[in-house]
Image: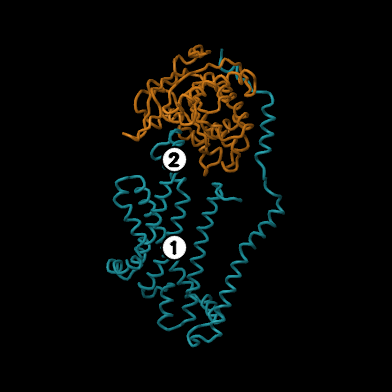
Chain colours: A cyan, B orange
């Protein structure tokens, strides 16, 4: 008896399949015009709490200003915002933003590179983990400003000193993110991957690394926060002549007791930080959506 | 008692090999000393190529451990497990699909692991998804599919490994009765025309009789082979047909007997 003879398909198979699938796969995409309306509704739902928050902050600020507390030095929102507007129309602020952004990109980029390599090595090599695993976590809790004396003695008053501290501040979080992702790769997926014949490098490349992506992005986000803080501390401490940066502008405002100017720069720093953070949130959300980790798409 | 050893001798001619899986005196003990747990005790079992063997037993009888041993994911404490030169694939109760890949991507990764080129991967993945009635769903991610569909992708992925031996660890256990019924037909169809040796673990006696050429009954703690039944029922079978129900009730009686002995 040949194996194929006996096992015949029941006749109604295709129909039953189609029927079950109609039950199972519901919730198709809505028509285009509805989708557009829903997008606007969702945008508005995300927007109004932010607008309201900004309005409340401005109102409280204005109230303090009107109340006359430290009247001589505490600026009102109107004066500050017009100062910010003036600065935005000069080349100096943009030049400073450019310098700071360049340092942020280079420093964070180096931190990602170094953090990822260290994370990958530590997660794979047990003795290395035993040796430096807790050191990485220790470095993470170290306030990066404490590194500046070290960095300045080592590299002098230079961009290198700033970048050095950024990397020390951000790389541990990034490494830890990757290590956590590798550690929490679901064992069932590992078994499936091994049975498929994925080994060593291919197991790492096609299974463990993609599986650690969400934790890695969380590490990147935290790393960015540390990098940004280290950079600001660095620019206030390491002031390089003829190289305007946000830190230099802030420092100058402090020397000249220019409260409006200082507040303007603080707002710029805050906005830039929020912008980058939003990028990471978007990346995180898009991963979660692809993986089906969100309730609604 | 209608106890027969094997009814599958006639199939051995196909490959020239007399058995695809052989377990001789296999024991598995977890832990050491006083807290040691004997999961499997002296299991000996031979499965000829092309046979569909169902392993049945109460929970805790070490069924999944047995599959892990055959898969090579774990090593036996004593005894010997041999799958010869067979390629072994496994399916779990959960589909275990990779959530960052599409359905087709999951199948293609199994092909890539075997070293298939890009064009071949694409073509084979399309064919395999067609085999499990999922053409048109290749671009979907696992979370966009229903439980039954995910398990069908997992089946396609297992087939992509070009395995001679397919181990199935309660693969339909988490599905509703109707979907499970459908997947039984699917599995029958897939098996037809392939020389697949299947070891199928379940605690559902009817499912075992519906699918298997042979049903092996295991005892609990430690797992031992206590009985085995040939299933001389013609295909196509239905899970609610009289012969299936009749044999299933006999096996259930045997299982009850074993469980009450274990409880005493």
Relative height, residue B45 to residue A42 (above, below): above
Residue under mark 2: which chain is it in?
A
Query: What kind of element bears circle 2?
Result: helix
Q: Contact, CB < 8 Å: mark 1 with mark 2?
A: no
Residue B22 location, quadrant? top left
Q: Secondary structure at mark 1?
A: helix
Q: Which residue is mark 2?
A: A187
Q: Position of residue A246 (x, y in %)?
A: 44, 72
Seen at 32% across and 49% down, the residue is A129
Name the spot of residue A283 as percent of width and height, x first. 52, 54
Residue nearer the viewer, A246 or B231: B231
**Residue B2 x/y as whole percent:** 53, 13
- Mark 1 vs mark 2: tell me if same chain: yes
Location of residue A238 (image quadrant): bottom left
Residues B201 and A93: in front is B201
Per the image, the residue denoted by label 1 is: A225
- The answer to whether residue B21 is left or right of residue B213 is left
Image spot of residue A176 (x, y percent): 39, 53
In this figure, what is the number of numbered marks?
2
* Left or right of residue A230, residue B259 in this image: right
Q: Chain of mark 1?
A: A
Tag 1: Cα neighbours inside 10 Å, few (<14), some, or many (≥20)? some
> In what quadrant of the picture does the N terminus of chain A appear?
top right
The residue depicted at 43 percent of the width and 30 percent of the height is: B65
Graded by Cα atoms within 10 Å as few (under 14), some (14 to 19) or many (20 or more), the crowding at tag 2 reads few
């Amino acid at each position: 008896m040949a194996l194929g003879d006996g096992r015949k398909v029941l006749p109604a198979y295709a129909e039953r399949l189609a029927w079950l699938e109609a039950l199972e796969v519901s919730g198709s995409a809505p028509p285009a015009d509805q989708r557009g309306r829903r997008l606007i509704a969702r945008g508005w739902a995300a927007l109004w709490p932010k607008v309201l928050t900004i309005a409340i902050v401005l109102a409280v600020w204005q109230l303090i200003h009107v109340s006359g507390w430290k009247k001589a030095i505490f600026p009102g929102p109107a004066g500050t915002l017009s100062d910010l507007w003036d600065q935005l129309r000069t080349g100096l602020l943009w030049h400073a933003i450019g310098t700071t952004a360049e340092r942020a990109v280079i420093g964070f980029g180096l931190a990602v590179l170094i953090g990822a390599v260290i994370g990958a090595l530590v997660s794979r090599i047990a003795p290395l983990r035993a040796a430096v695993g807790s050191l990485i976590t220790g470095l993470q809790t170290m306030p990066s400003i404490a590194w500046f004396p070290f960095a300045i003695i080592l590299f002098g008053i230079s961009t290198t000193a700033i970048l050095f501290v950024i990397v020390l501040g951000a790389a541990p979080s990034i490494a830890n993110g990757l290590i956590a992702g590798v550690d929490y790769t679901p064992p069932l997926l590992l078994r499936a991957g091994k049975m498929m014949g994925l080994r060593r490098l291919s197991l790492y490349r096609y299974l463990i690394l993609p599986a650690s992506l969400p934790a890695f992005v969380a590490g990147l986000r935290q790393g960015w926060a540390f990098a940004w803080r280290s950079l600001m501390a660095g620019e206030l401490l390491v002031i390089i002549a003829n190289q305007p940066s946000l830190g230099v502008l802030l420092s100058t405002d402090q020397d000249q007791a220019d409260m409006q100017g200082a507040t303007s720069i603080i707002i710029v720093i805050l906005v830039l930080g929020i912008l980058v953070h939003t990028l990471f949130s978007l990346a995180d959300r898009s991963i979660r959506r692809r993986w089906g980790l969100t309730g609604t798409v | 008692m209608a106890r027969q050893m094997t009814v599958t001798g006639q199939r051995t001619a196909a490959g020239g090999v007399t058995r695809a899986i052989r377990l001789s005196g296999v024991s598995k003990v977890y832990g050491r000393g006083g807290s040691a747990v004997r999961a499997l005790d002296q299991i000996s079992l031979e499965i000829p190529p092309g046979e569909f063997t169902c392993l049945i037993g109460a929970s805790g009888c070490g069924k999944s451990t047995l599959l892990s041993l055959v898969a090579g994911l774990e090593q036996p404490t004593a005894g010997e497990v041999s799958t010869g030169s067979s390629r072994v694939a496994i399916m779990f109760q959960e589909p275990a699909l990779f959530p960052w890949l599409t359905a087709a991507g999951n199948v293609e990764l199994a092909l890539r692991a075997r070293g298939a080129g890009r064009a071949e991967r694409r073509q084979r993945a399309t064919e395999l998804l067609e085999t499990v009635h999922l053409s048109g769903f290749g671009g979907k991610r696992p979370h966009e599919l229903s439980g039954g569909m995910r398990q069908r992708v997992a089946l396609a992925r297992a087939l992509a490994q070009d395995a001679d031996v397919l181990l199935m660890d309660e693969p339909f256990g988490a599905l509703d009765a109707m979907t499970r019924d459908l997947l039984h037909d699917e599995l029958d169809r897939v098996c037809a025309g392939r020389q697949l040796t299947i070891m199928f673990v379940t605690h559902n006696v009817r499912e075992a009789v519906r699918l298997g050429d042979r049903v092996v009954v295991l005892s609990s703690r430690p797992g031992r082979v206590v009985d085995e039944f040939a299933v001389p029922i013609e295909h196509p079978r239905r899970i609610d047909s009289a012969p299936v129900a009749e044999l299933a009730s006999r096996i259930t009686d045997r299982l009850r007997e074993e469980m009450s002995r274990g409880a005493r």
